[in-house]
Image (cartoon, rainbow, N blue to C red):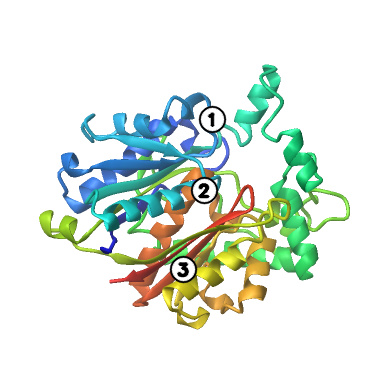
């Protein structure tokens, strides 16, 4: 089987809810990151054979095939096809997997994996809420599913609390982790660590949006610990959970033939692609067994990985993953994570890949591992080797 190489990886800076990116239509925002990977590589736009776009809330401005609309809003010719996919929070990480599988198989040579989510313009949960309001159907979970798992609904908030309980984490530990996320993000911004991955977007006041808007430069443990708990007796709060965020991301993936035909320079080689699934009730624990399987199949140990990007959906997710895997905390989310930088759902997978690839290269490191917890108890893990 052939190899898959990443030759460009970009993202927008995150926008807060109703913040700087809220004036951008998601199709246009997605179009900008497609333009960026084409511009940065100098590839002929007509050479792109497919575009795979992750998006979670595919309704309203993100409906009617958001992937195709992203292409139509870009400089790519309308002869370039696209597909929209939903693997919940791992949607654009799965887009990277599908792109890699396509070029590794040799059926295509040049594929863009991307993601977009405007959580300001299409709020989280809109597909379910709007259908419910319109009286359409009975909701996503049938009575058969409810009986099988003994729940009326599946909730990421319930899963995050269950993780904290199972692995023995209290609120103070979650809040301390949240503070660290902000501190690392602040340090990264001050060091210009994101410069090579961010695509500037012009915003309403005419300025260019180049810095993640959700980072709190005045973050303190006192402020974080004062935020109201999501449920009485629990340990979760908005401050130790990922931020609502608007954003888009894209990764250009090619094989050996694509590299040579278009005179492209690889940033990284994809070493392993893994996806697993497990308990949909606790839901967010699945990155743990998925990581173990990825390492085993990739012929690596946890200590061989130089940098990790573990999505900070909730602080309890990363802390549980650290406890179970024994990974070095100093190698995990070194530039901060979604608690500080935001989690634009369908765009987060390719966003984290952009951050991981550029961080490996800046630090002169070799292997990076990205893991994502996803609705329904699924997890994607990707291992890359910087070149």
**Mark before the other along the chain sequence, 3 or 1:** 1
How far apart are the two marked residues, 2 and 3, measured between alpha carbons?
26 Å
Residue at image position (48%, 46%) is 91
Dot 2 and dot 1 residues touching (CB under 8 Å): no
Q: Nearer the viewer, mark 2 or mark 1?
A: 1
Dividing the image into 4 quarters, which one contains the C terminus? Answer: bottom left
**Mark before the other along the chain sequence, 2 or 3:** 2
For label 2, count other residues whose C-alpha is less than 10 Å away and answer few (under 14), some (14-19) or many (20+).
many
- Name the spot of residue 42 as percent of width and height, x first: 16, 50
How far apart are the two marked residues, 2 and 1, measured between alpha carbons?
17 Å
Most foreground residue, 312 or 256: 256
Q: Horizontal placement of 325 versus 154: left or right? A: left
- Indicate whether 202 appears above or below 170: above
Q: Which mark is residue 213?
A: 2
For label 1, count other residues whose C-alpha is less than 10 Å away and answer few (under 14), some (14-19) or many (20+).
many
Residue at image position (30%, 66%) is 268
Most foreground residue, 328 or 82: 82
Q: Secondary structure at mark 2?
A: loop
- Name the spot of residue 240 as percent of width and height, x first: 69, 57
Q: Nearer the viewer, mark 2 or mark 3?
A: 3
Q: Which mark is residue 369?
A: 3
Q: Is residue 169 visible?
A: no
Instruction: Give the labeled residue for mark 1.
Output: 121
Q: Horizontal placement of 55 versus 169: left or right? A: left
- Name the spot of residue 211 as percent of width and height, x first: 44, 51
Q: Horizontal placement of 102 versus 117: left or right? A: left
- Name the spot of residue 260 as percent of width and height, x first: 12, 60
- Indicate whether 122 appears above or below 43: above
Q: Secondary structure at mark 3?
A: strand
- Indicate whether 175 appears above or below 231: below
């Amino acid at each position: 089987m052939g190899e898959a190489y990443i030759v460009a990886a970009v993202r927008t800076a995150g926008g807060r809810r109703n913040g700087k990116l809220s004036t951008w239509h998601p199709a246009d925002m997605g179009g900008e990151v497609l333009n960026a990977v084409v511009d940065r590589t100098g590839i002929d736009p007509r050479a792109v054979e497919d575009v795979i776009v992750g998006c979670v809330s595919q309704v309203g401005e993100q409906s009617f095939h958001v992937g195709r609309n992203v292409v139509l809003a870009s400089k790519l010719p309308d002869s370039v096809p696209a597909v929209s996919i939903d693997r919940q929070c791992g949607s654009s990480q799965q887009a990277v997997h599908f792109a890699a599988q396509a070029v590794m198989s040799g059926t295509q040579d040049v594929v863009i994996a991307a993601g977009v989510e405007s959580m300001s313009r299409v709020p989280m949960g809109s597909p379910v809420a709007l259908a419910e309001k319109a009286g359409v159907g009975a909701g996503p979970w049938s009575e058969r599913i409810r009986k099988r798992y003994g729940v009326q609904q599946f909730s990421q908030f319930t899963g995050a609390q269950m993780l904290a309980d199972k692995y023995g984490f209290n609120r103070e530990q979650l809040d301390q982790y949240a503070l660290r996320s902000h501190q690392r993000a602040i340090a990264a911004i001050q060091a210009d660590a994101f410069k090579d991955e961010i695509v500037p977007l012009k915003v309403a006041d005419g300025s260019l949006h180049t810095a993640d808007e959700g980072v709190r430069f005045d973050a303190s443990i006192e402020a974080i610990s004062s935020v109201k708990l999501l449920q009485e007796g629990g340990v979760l709060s908005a401050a130790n959970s990922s931020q609502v965020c608007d954003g888009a991301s894209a990764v250009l993936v090619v094989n050996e033939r694509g590299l040579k035909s278009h005179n492209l320079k690889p940033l990284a080689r994809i070493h392993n692609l893994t996806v697993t699934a497990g308990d949909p009730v606790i839901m967010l624990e699945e990155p743990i067994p998925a990581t173990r399987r990825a390492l085993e199949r990739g012929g690596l140990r946890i200590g061989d990985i130089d940098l990790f990007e573990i999505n900070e959906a909730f602080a309890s997710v990363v802390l549980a993953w650290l406890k179970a895997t024994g990974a070095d905390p100093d190698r995990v989310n070194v530039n901060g994570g979604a608690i500080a930088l935001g989690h634009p759902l369908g765009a987060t997978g390719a966003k984290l890949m952009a951050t991981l690839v550029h961080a490996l290269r800046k630090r002169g490191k070799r292997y990076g591992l990205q893991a994502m917890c996803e609705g329904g108890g699924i997890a994607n893990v990707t291992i890359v080797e910087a070149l």
